[in-house]
Amino acid sequence: DPGTAFDDCVHRWAYAMAPARDPADVVAHAAVDACGAAMNAWNQQLMASAQETAPPPTRGARGYDEQAAQPPQNAALAEHMRTAEARSLFYVVQARAAGCAPPPANTLVSSPS
């Protein structure tokens, strides 16, 4: 599951970077950036799912309605990014508050190779 693999990645990177002296939001953003490949896989899953469930294009007076044919992909991708950043910030703050070390990679779900 790409969403779980992304969460695993962000969890580990956020905890690993939490001791940095930068503000928590900067560290959280860096953790999301470090998981770019996992985020791309998660977004691709979303896009594939959106295309499967998108309604067929409607025919208007001038032909097919291009906007009606497009799934709300930009909104979904923006929501993914907000979720990712919020989750990462949570992990950074959690790690700082408890002084936690990063979880070992073998104890969390990893993405398939």
Image (cartoon, rainbow, N blue to C red):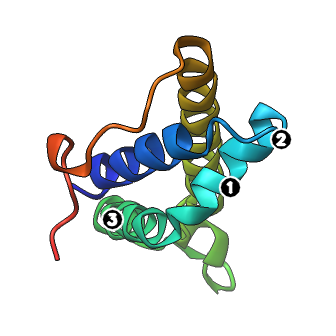
Q: Report the side of 4 relative to 54 (left or right).
A: left
Labelled pair 1, 2 in contact (Cβ < 8 Å): yes
Foreground mark, 1 or 3, reads 1
Q: CA distance from mark 1 to mark 3?
A: 23 Å
Alpha carbon distance from label 2 to label 3? 32 Å
Q: Which mark is residue 45?
A: 3
Give the mark, 2 or 3, whose residue is nearer the N terminus.
Answer: 2
Amino acid type at circle 3 is Gln
Q: Position of residue 53 (x, y in %)?
A: 31, 59
Name the spot of residue 6 as percent of width and height, x first: 38, 53
How many residues crowd around disc 3 within 10 Å: few (fewer than 14), some, or many (20 or more)? some
Ranked by sequence position, the earlier of labels 1 and 3 is 1
Q: Amino acid at mark 1?
A: Ala
Going by the picture, which residue comes out furthest to the bottom?
Answer: 63
- Disc 2 residue type? Asp
The vertical placement of 20 against 98, above or below, is below
Q: Residues within 10 Å of mark 2 (few under 14, many from 20)?
A: few
Q: In percent of the image, x 31 and y 61: which residue is there? A: 49
Give the camera-side residue of 65 and 96. 96
Q: Which mark is residue 30?
A: 1
Binning the other alpha carbons within 10 Å of mark 1 as few (below 14), some (14 to 19) or many (20 upward) gives some
- The residue tagged 2 is 22
Pick the front one: 54 or 24: 24
Which of pointers 1 and 2 indicates the residue nearer the eye? 2
Query: Which residue is at 63% across, 78% downward?
Result: 66
Residue at horizontal 62 percent and vertical 36 percent from the top: 18
